Each structure stands twice: as C-alpha cells, then as structure tokens.
C-alpha cells in the first residue's frame, strides 16, 4: 500500500496555525466538561433549523416578486450559477444602509465565507514572489493560513494597545520595499479585532488610508464583528472613508446571520486596465480565481442568506438587535467577572491585566507566566476551563504570556463560572 511522507506534502498541511487549532479542538474533545472561553463561535440558541426553510421561502417569494418565472427560479436555486453570486444586489443595499458603503453590485463577489474572500483576494493581488502581505499582529489565523497555502509571505506590523499605528505600517512598508519586495496590501480587522479585541479610532482609520496612498498599498478590511459594539458609537468602515478605492472590503455573514451557511463576500471596486486599455473591475478579475476555487457559492446557501437580507429590510444592524444586546451583555459579564475574580491590588502586584475592548467577542489577559499548550492542558484537566494562547496569533514569538478569552458562545452564568476557574489557575501560577 502506498505510504506518503508528510515532509513531501505542501507546507500548508503541517501549518503551525492549524496544528494549534487542532490541538485546541483535541483538548476540548478530551475534556468535554470544560467551560470554553476559547471558542469564538456565535451563540447557538439564536438559531432554529426552521429558519432555514422560512428564509428560503422569503427568497423564493422575492425572486417571484422580481418577475422570475418558475423555470428561472428553479435555475437560480438548482443550477450552476453566476461565479460572483446572485445576492450581490441585496448585499449592495445592505452595505449602503448599514455601512454607508456605496458600490455597484457588480463590484461584489459572494464567496464561501469570508475565508474564501481572503484566499481569492490574496491570490489575485500577489502576482510574483516579491509581493508580500502586511498584516496587523497579533493576527487572525485565517489570513496567515491562507497566505501560507498560497505561498505568499506575510510581514507582521505589530499592534499596540490602541491597535495599528499608521507610522508602523509606513515603516514596515518602507523596509519591505527597500529589501526589493513589494508591499501589496495590508490586512486588518478595524473593529473589535480577533484576537486582540482592539478597535481603531476614526483618526487612525483616516491616517491608515493616507499611509496606504503614500506607500501605494491596498487595504484588506475584514469586518465580521462591526455590528457588535458595546455602545451605539459609529465606527466608520475604512471602505466608507476611502475616496481612493484603496480598500477591498471583506464581509462575513457568520456572526450577523449564521456560520453554517458559509456565505461571505468581498467588495473590489478597483478599476483594472489591461494592455489594450480595456477597463474592468477587480471583482470581475477575481471571479476567474473564484471559478477555480469553488465555481460559485452554493445558490441554496445564498438563497437562505438572501431571504434573511430581504426579511431584514436591508439592515442587519436593525435585524440583529437581540444578538447585539446579548453579545454586549456577555462582554460586560466577561470584564466584570475578571474584575471580581481577580481583584485589585493583588492583580496589579502580580502583573495581571487585561484590555477593555469596546465591543466584539474577545479580550486579552496578560499573565505573569508562560501560557502555552502544556498549561492549557493542565487548565482543562485540573481547572475545567479552556482559553486560547495568544502565541497562536504571532508569526515568530510574541504573545507567550497572554491569553485570549472569548465570550460569544456561552451564557453569562457560564462566562462567570469560566472566569472563576481561570482565576484559580492564575492565582496558583502567579
Ligand atoms: C477576523 C475574522 N475574519 C473572518 C472570519 C471567518 O469568517 P467566515 O466564517 O465568514 O469565513 C472570522 C471568524 O472567526 C474572523 O474572526
């Protein structure tokens, strides 16, 4: 029987990022009674399987209202479809209503989750080995993993407590260029980032756009958590501030609708000119990449999400009020529980501190000991609590004494219980 050497498979097979996530899942399976402050999944009780049929029916009625015949409706749902998708008009309306992003539906590609949008964007933009991607670090593993799969180098730009410093971006872009490589794009999550929880101020967003123009960089703006602020403050997307078409906006319906649909999108309204002077949109060009990855996003999944968009009357912000309130409550519970179970002055004396994100699913706790896989296993076995080592989100060292806590998947009581367990671990180790 044939036997393959792992060392002869592509490096992405043994991706350290995915190995870390596999390790986390394996621990979660081995200790099923643990409280998981590691899982960044959305809260499941918002969903019922009845919703799937209901929203499908809403979308079918929408197609009939648009004048499609039964044969056309059947084709829309059951045939191979347009590569860039069929709910692009609904997404364009949504972006205008919720985000003040005004783009032609033709600039939108409906993808298999935001993850596929990242793969397509990075593949399409990075043409030669010298093209590198800059990424805020600590960094979401989906983009570093996608880049590794594609053989694209990622150069980290360290975040500070306030997020990404535009001067650091300019500096890294300069040094990349000085080394003979081309900084093609910058990836970032401006709202309640995963993993750091940090958000960028409006001035920083504007300054980043200025740096991108100066350094001739595109920006990949990933915004899956933007709806879930602790308050009603408006946090303009970079795309809505972008007068230079520098920003490719990456969207996900995983948190605002549900992740099992696997529907996301990208907005790429940049003009592309070929050697004959013909102009197209970047979204058109990227559709060729998409056609070789997934052909088209499942029309059935698009129909369910399309039905949710129709039912939401164009605003997921309005349709998500209940979820927004729930996640706000959970983040407040997480921060309050940390305060209660790790009180002052002892915590400062021991070097324990955490950031206070203004929304989203995550916060980061600095601890005075190595928070590695070995400790995670002890934490699961002896304390019954899971968390994510921050080191998983750094390319080369960093994050060794910090942990990411997630509060999306649990009830407030479970969060408090998890933090109490974590506090016992921290007290025993400090
Ligand atoms: C920053 C970030 N981007 C993208 C995604 C993935 O989105 P999707 O499920 O639509 O592929 C996640 C999911 O956790 C995320 O945290």
Image (tube, grey):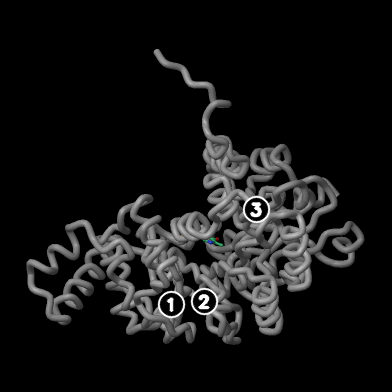
- Disc 2 target residue: 227
Horizontal side, residue 52 vs residue 292: left or right: left
Foreground of the two, 272 or 297: 272
Residue furthest front as drawn: 276
Foreground of the two, 26 or 189: 189
Determine the image quadrant of residue 274. Answer: bottom left
The answer to whether residue 409 shows anywhere in this view is no
Mark 1 or mark 3: name the one nearer the start of the chain: 3
> Depth-wise, is mark 3 or mark 2 nearer the camera?
3
Q: Residue at x 7, y 70 (%)?
A: 70
Q: Secondary structure at mark 1?
A: loop
Mark 3, Cα crowd under 10 Å, few <14 / some 14-19 / many 20+, is many
Q: CA distance from mark 2 to mark 1?
A: 8 Å
Q: Is residue 267 above or below residue 317?
A: above
Report x, y in % for residue 406: 61, 60
Q: Secondary structure at mark 2?
A: loop
Foreground of the two, 261 or 54: 261
Mark 3 or mark 2: name the one nearer the start of the chain: 3
- Disc 1 target residue: 320
Q: CA distance from mark 3 to mark 2?
A: 28 Å
Determine the image quadrant of residue 175. Answer: bottom right
Q: CA distance from mark 1 to mark 3?
A: 34 Å
Report x, y in % for residue 187: 61, 64
- Are dots 2 and 1 in contact, CB under 8 Å? yes
- Are dots 3 and 2 in contact, CB under 8 Å? no
Mark 2 or mark 1: name the one nearer the start of the chain: 2
- Disc 3 target residue: 154
The answer to whether residue 158 shows anywhere in this view is yes
């Amino acid at each position: 029987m044939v036997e393959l050497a792992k060392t002869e498979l592509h490096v992405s097979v043994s991706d350290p990022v995915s190995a870390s996530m596999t390790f986390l899942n394996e621990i979660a399976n081995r200790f099923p009674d643990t409280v998981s402050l590691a899982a960044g999944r959305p809260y499941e009780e918002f969903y019922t399987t009845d919703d799937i049929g209901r929203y499908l029916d809403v979308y079918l009625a929408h197609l009939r209202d648009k004048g499609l015949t039964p044969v056309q409706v059947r084709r829309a749902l059951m045939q191979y479809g347009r590569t860039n998708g069929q709910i692009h008009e609904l997404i364009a309306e949504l972006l205008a209503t919720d985000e003040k992003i005004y783009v032609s539906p033709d600039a939108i590609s409906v993808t298999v989750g935001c993850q596929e949008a990242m793969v397509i964007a990075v593949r399409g933009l990075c043409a030669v080995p010298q093209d590198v991607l800059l990424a805020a670090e600590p960094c979401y593993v989906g983009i570093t993993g996608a880049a590794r799969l594609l053989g694209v180098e990622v150069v980290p730009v360290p975040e500070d407590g306030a997020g990404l410093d535009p001067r650091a971006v300019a500096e890294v872009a300069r040094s990349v260029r000085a080394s003979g490589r081309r900084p093609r794009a910058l990836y970032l999550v401006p709202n309640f980032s995963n993993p750091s929880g940090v958000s960028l101020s409006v001035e920083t967003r504007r300054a980043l756009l200025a740096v991108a123009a100066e350094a001739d960089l595109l920006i990949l703006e990933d915004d899956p958590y933007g709806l879930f602020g602790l308050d009603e403050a408006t946090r303009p997307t970079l795309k809505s501030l972008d007068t230079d078409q520098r920003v490719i906006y990456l969207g996900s319906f995983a948190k605002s609708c549900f992740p099992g649909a696997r529907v996301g999108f990208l907005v790429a309204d940049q003009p592309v000119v070929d050697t004959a002077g013909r102009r197209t949109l970047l979204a058109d060009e990227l559709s060729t990449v998409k056609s070789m990855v997934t052909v088209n996003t499942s029309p059935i999944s698009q129909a369910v999400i399309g039905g949710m968009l129709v039912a939401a009357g164009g605003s997921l912000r309005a349709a998500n009020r209940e979820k927004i309130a729930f996640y706000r409550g959970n983040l407040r519970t997480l921060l309050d529980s940390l305060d209660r179970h790790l009180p002052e002055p002892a915590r400062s004396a021991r070097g324990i501190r955490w950031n206070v994100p203004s929304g989203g699913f995550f916060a980061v706790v600095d601890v005075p000991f190595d928070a590695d896989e070995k400790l995670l296993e002890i934490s699961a076995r002896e304390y019954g609590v899971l968390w994510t080592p921050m080191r998983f989100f750094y390319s080369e060292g960093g994050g060794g004494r910090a942990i990411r806590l997630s509060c999306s998947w649990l009830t407030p009581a479970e969060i408090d219980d998890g933090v109490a367990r974590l506090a016992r671990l921290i007290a025993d180790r400090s």
